Amino acid sequence: MKLLFDESLSPRLVELLRDLFPDSESALTNGLARTGDPRILEYAASPGAKVVILRSCNYPTDVAAEVLRRNAIRIAAMPQGKDRLIILDR
């Protein structure tokens, strides 16, 4: 399963969560940095993608990783599509 991490989240999440989300990417390393949220959401809406929003972008990287790990089953069960998203809280 693939997640795209917004540029406000550490690119280290890609490696920290590779076991659960092996095809994930960071906007900071795939050319989407500073392109703006509309472009990032457009990219994230590609086939097979799911949009996951963390309520706060100020989580330390290890906390963000834990929130995503704790919700991995919910994320996997989500329908796919650009109008499908989940908002996670700490």
Image: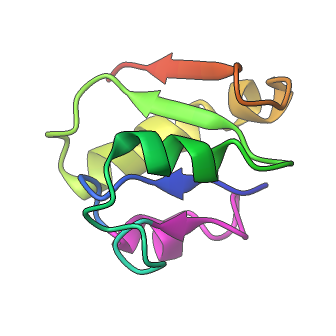
Residue 89 lies within the magenta run: no
Q: Position of residue 50 (x, y in %)?
A: 70, 38
Q: Nearer the viewer, residue 19 or 52?
A: 52
Q: Residue at x 70, y 58 (%)?
A: 20
Q: Which residues are magenta?
A: 11-26
Q: Position of residue 70 (x, y in %)?
A: 55, 34
Q: Give the quadrant of residue 9.
A: bottom left
Q: On the rendered structure, is 33 left or right of 41?
A: left
Q: Residue at x 56, y 63 (%)?
A: 17
Give the colouring mode of the picture: rainbow
Q: Please state, as top left, top right, bottom left or bottom right, where the N terminus lies in the image.
A: bottom right
Q: Please state, as top left, top right, bottom left or bottom right, where the C terminus lies in the image.
A: top left
Relative to 10, is 90 above or below?
A: above
View extreme (left): residue = 58
Q: Residue at x 41, y 67 (%)?
A: 32
Relative to 86, is 20 above or below?
A: below
Q: Position of residue 64 (x, y in %)?
A: 34, 45
